[in-house]
Image: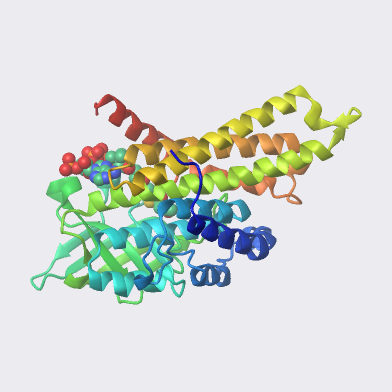
Amino acid sequence: MDFHFSEEQLQIQAIARDIARKRIAPVAADFDKSGEFPLANIREMGQLGLMGIEVPAEYGGAGMDSIAYVLAMIEIAEADCAHSTIMSVNNTLYCNGLLKFGNEEQKHKYVTPIANGSAIGAFALTEPQSGSDATAMRCRAVKQADGSFVINGKKSWITSGPVAKYILLFAMSDPDKHARGITAFMIDTERAGFHRGKTEPKLGIRASATCEIEFTDYRVPAADVIGEEGHGFKIAMGVLDAGRIGIASQAVGLARAAYEATLVYARDRKAFGQSIGSFQMIQQKIADMKCKLDAAYWLTLRAAWAKQQGERFSTEAAVAKLTASEAAMWITHQAVQIHGGMGYSKEMPLERYFRDAKITEIYEGTSEIQRMVIARHETGLR
Ligand code: CAA
């Protein structure tokens, strides 16, 4: 067992830390307020290799491993959760999904522009009436005589939907087969039949644009079917396993930002003639924050390591995502409490961290779904 990182992993961590501190942290509060999509920063992150960390150089990426991805995600999330949301969707839900399940032509055509930051990707599984119960989707894909498909239906909560050039879509191609009747498709948002709906007003990650999308007789050529027909659900679940490591990393970065700010405040803020960090009640909170943060960090790295071994890593990813997201929620809550009025004020970033943390317990599988995945694995029961 080796707890050291490689030169390469430390290098991407340093690159991410540099842009996070110089370009992202200084504007995070403004983007949170305006809800504007941080396009210039995302482009620059792409040029630095941060939008396709695990994508080989021949497809425009940085060609690094999953541990490198975790380290870079933590740095970006520490500066701003919204930037890290866009980064995680581009990297894992979009690029890694296509890398694993796409053919050579699809990888060159659809991975390269997203990995190098010249375009934005998205992932469309959720629908207005189906979130956790993903196989209950109604979006239909009807096969035509020439092998193409015609898509009709709606998808909701699409991260980066308002700006995405390409979307990895899951639609029901054979409703009688339920999970085995779902197929994955590549969507070019510039083709006829694709519409963007209203942008969601959100509690947190406000600069990551989210919207509903709709398909009206949208035609997908046979060449843009991803993987085999009917294998879409397994593709979505496999992609989400990797995505959950990204969200765990995001939660670690966010929790770390709240924790570091709290340490500074607990030392500086005086009450009753001493630093508030001297009081046992604050010390207890700080010790608990540190334990949860470390547990989240190492479980996330364990999940990334498990992914690299090439075996199924669904349980490790679920354990990491559950632990890290609940740690981020708890740590940001305590951080606001320790900062008192300043924690509640928009003059400091604590209230933003607190709002941003909530989504990590919801998207890419709620905490309840993570518990279901873990318990099914542990008990062998369904
Ligand atoms: N990898 C590969 N295959 C998998 C798998 C995985 N992780 N999980 C399930 N499968 C396979 C099963 O083996 C099964 O295959 P067979 O038919 O060959 O037996 C098939 O898929 C169906 O599996 P289940 O019977 O377990 O399916 P289920 O209906 O009970 O659902 C679930 C399982 C875990 C609840 C799943 O539906 C799930 O994860 N739901 C949550 C969905 C989710 O995370 N949505 C997030 C939306 S995306 C998002 O949030 C993006 C964003 O904006 C940032």
Residue 129 visible from this viewpoint: no
Q: Residue 374: where, in percent of width, then height?
A: 35, 32
- Quadrant of residue 196 within the rendered picture: bottom left
Residue at the image position 57 percent from the left and 63 percent from the top: 15
Relative depth, front residue between 245 and 228: 245
Q: Residue at x 31, y 75 (%)?
A: 109
Position of 40 with respect to 212 (left or right) is right
Q: Measured from the top left, where is residue 84 in percent x and y?
A: 52, 56
Looking at the picture, does residue 308 appear above or below residue 370?
below
Left or right, 308 with respect to 174, comes to right
Left or right placement of residue 205 versus residue 279 in this view: left
Give the left or right position of residue 341, taking residue 107 as reference.
right
Q: Quadrant of ligand 1?
A: top left
Toward the left, the furthest residue is 145
Instruction: Work out whether residue 296 or residue 56 is closer to the camera in this orientation and state it.
Output: 56
Position in image of residue 273 (x %, y %): 91, 29
Can residue 144 be seen in this snapshot?
yes
What is the x, y in percent for residue 137? 27, 50
User: Which residue corresponds to the image point at 29% horizontal and 31% vertical from the top-left?
Assistant: 377
